[in-house]
Amino acid sequence: MKTKNIFRMLLVAAALLLGANNVKADTETPLWDGEGSTLSCVKINGTAFTNLTGTSYKLRVYTNNGDQIFIAAGSDENDESQNEPLFYTQYNTWIRNGEYYNSAGYFEFPLTGEMITKLSQKGLIVKYYNSTFSKISLIEVSGGGGSSTTGVTVWTGSVWVGKWGDGGSYGYLPNNTFSSLKCDGTDIIRVYGTLGNLGTDDWGNAWYIQILGGNWEPQGGWDCLNRSGNNTSDFTGHVDFVVSSEVASILKNNTNSRDGNCAILNGHNITYTSIVVNPSNTNATTPTLTFPQSSYNVTYGTTFDAPTATCNVDGLTISYGSSNPNVAEVASNGAVTIKAVGRATITASTPATDVYNAATASYQLVVSKANIELSYSPQEATATIGEAWTAPTLSNPSHVAVTYSSTNQNVATIDANGNVTLVGAGETWIKANYAGDNNYNAKEASYKLTVNGGPEIPEYISVNMGNYECRTYVTTTYIDFSQSVGIKGYYATGLNNEGTAVQFTKVTGVVPPHVPLLLQKISGAFEYKLRISNTENATAPSPNKLNAGSSSIFNSGIWGSSIYVLTVHNNQLVFAEVSDVNKKAHVDEEHAYLDLNNSNAHARLTISFDDNNNGATGIDAIENNEQSREVIYDLHGQRVQNPTKGVYIINGKKMVVK
C-alpha cells in the first residue's frame, strides 16, 4: 500500500481553495511577515478583521510543509479554554472545517462571516507543529464563491492511480472538500481524469472510478461508477456522479470520517486531474436578483420593514439568510427580526437549475443603539427644612437600572432608592443616571432643588481641653464667646510693672479667624464648645502678645529671649522663657506662644486674668499638642455617641454622615 500514502500526500499538496476557479483577481493583504521566523505561534490583533467591505475572504498561511497547523479565534495560545478553534490541518488529531495546501507553499482557509466576526472580537492565533511560517495574509476574493458556469472546483492536480499489483488504488479527500454541496438531491460531483493503458486488474476491470465514504467500503448506498472490460486505448474525459441528499450530507458533514477525511477517491489505471461540484450547464443563464438598496440603518427596538428581493425570472425559489443571526434573524420570506446592535449581511439566493445558474443578492443591515426615555417632572423644586415637600417624579418607562446622586450633599442627599434627605440651605442638582449597555445609549435626568433653611440651629466646635485647666488656641472661624459652652477666652495685653506676670483680658463678643487666645475651663463644666457665629464681621482684639504657631515652627522649633510657652512650675501655670537653642519650643498651628519683644520680663511669668481669676494649679508638664479624640455633636450642641445620617460637628468640623 505504498501508493496510498504517496497519493494522500500528493492529493493534499495539490488541493486548491473551494471555488478557486471563480477567482479572477484576488487582493492579498499581509497580516504578518516573518521570513525565516522560528516562532511556533503568531498572534494577530482583531482590528485586522474589522471594517472589511468585501463579501468573500480567505486566510493564507505560507509554510514550508502541510503538517499540523492550528488556527483559532483568541488571544492567549496557552489558554485553550478561551480560544475557539476554526481550522486544523490534515495530520492533526482534531480535523475541522477543511484545509487546502498547494504547490505554491501555502494553506488557504475560507472564512465565513461568523468566523470574521469572532476574529475581530478575539483576534487570531496561528500555531504550527513540525513547520515554519514565512507570511500570513488576508485574501479578498474577487467574484466570491458558489456556482458558476464551471461549477466549484474543489481539487486540481495530476495523480496517477495504478492497478492492484502496481501499488494501491485509492487516496483521501480532506475535510471540507465538498462543503459547497446543497444536499437537496440535485448535487453533481464531476471527476476528470485520463485513463491509462495498463490492462486489467485481478478482477478483470480495465478501469473504474469510485467515490466512497471515509472508510474502506461504500457506505449507505453511495453512488459510484464501475466500468469493466479490456479498453486498449487511452480515455480522456470525466465521470458525473449524481449524489443523493443523504450521501451529500455525509460528504459535506464528514459523518463517515476515516482519519479525519471526508471521502476516498478509488479507481484503477487512471490519472485524476480535477474534481468539480455542481458543474453548470454551459448554455445556462444567470438570473438578475436585486434588493432596492445596498444598505439599511435601523435603531434597536424598532420594527424593520425588511425589503424582499426581486428576480427577473418567474418561478424561481428565493431563499434568505443572515451572516450574523445574533444581530438579525431572517425568515424564509425575507422578514427580519432585530436581535442586537451590530452589523449583518442579509442575502437572497436562487438555486441553479438545468436552465439557470444560481444567483445571489445582498444588503448590509446596520443596527444602532437606541435612546431611552428618562426624565424628571417638574425640573425644578423648592423645599424648606423641617417642612413637608413633594419631590419631582422620575419617568422611566423602560425600567432601566439607574444610580442617583446629589451635586451638593451639604444641601441634600439621595439614597439608592431615590429618596431625598434635606441637609442645609442652598442649591443642588438631583440626578438619575443610566450607564447604557450593548443596545441602549446612556441617559441622565436631573432637576434643580433649592432648599431654604428652617429654624436657626446653632453650630459649635468642640475643643479638647484634655487634663489642663487652660490651653492656648487659634480660632479657625468666627467664634461668639458670649454663647460658647464651658470655656472663656483671653488675649495677652502685656506685662505688669514688675515684669513678673502676663496680663490677660477676657473676650466678650465675636472673634474672627486666626486669632491666638488662651482658653480657660469654666468651673464645673463637662463640655467645652465654641459657638460658631452667624456674624462674619468682627475685629481681632488688640494689642495681643500671643502669636499663632505653624507647621514650620512645629517642625523646626522656635527659641529666643522674648519667646515664652505655656508650662507649669511648682504646680503653678506659667509662661516659661525659651532661651536655650537646645531646648526649642515646637508649636503647631492649633496653639500659640508669647513674643514679648525683648522686654525686661522674668524667665517665668505667672498669669493674671482681668476678671480676677488668678491662675490655675495641678498641671505637671509642658503644654501638650496632642491630637483630639473624635468628639461628635449634633447641630443642637448635644453630644452624640453613635451618629446616624445627618449633619454633625466632628472634632470641631461640620460633616455629613451618610
Image (spheres, grey):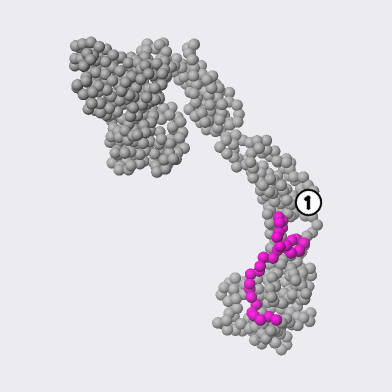
In the image, is 549 to the left or to the right of 509? left
The spot of residue 323 in percent (x, y) is: 48, 27
The spot of residue 336 in percent (x, y) is: 55, 24
Q: Disc 1 marks which amino acid?
A: Thr
Q: Quadrant of residue 107?
A: top left
Q: Out of 129 and 597, give the one closest to the viewer.
A: 129
Q: Out of 286 and 4, give the one closest to the viewer.
A: 4
The spot of residue 588 in percent (x, y) is: 62, 72
Q: Is residue 549 above or below residue 269?
A: below
| Magenta span contains residue 159 | no
| Magenta span contains residue 644 | yes
Q: From this viewpoint, is residue 215 visible?
A: yes
Q: Is residue 121 above or below residue 281?
A: below
Q: Residue at x 66, y 87 (%)?
A: 602
Q: Out of 205 and 21, give the one closest to the viewer.
A: 205
Quarter the C terminus occupies: bottom right
Q: Is residue 623 above or below residue 161?
A: below
* Residue under label 1: 384
Q: Quadrant of residue 181?
A: top left
In the image, is 8 to the left or to the right of 124? left
Quarter the N terminus occupies: top left
Magenta span main SS: loop
Q: Residue at x 33, y 19 (%)?
A: 218
Q: Which residues are magenta?
A: 618-647
Q: Residue at x 42, y 43 (%)?
A: 79
Q: Quadrant of residue 15?
A: top left
Q: How many residues crowd around disc 1 within 10 Å: few (fewer than 14), some, or many (20 or more)?
A: some
Q: Secondary structure at mark 1?
A: strand
Q: Residue at x 69, y 49 (%)?
A: 414
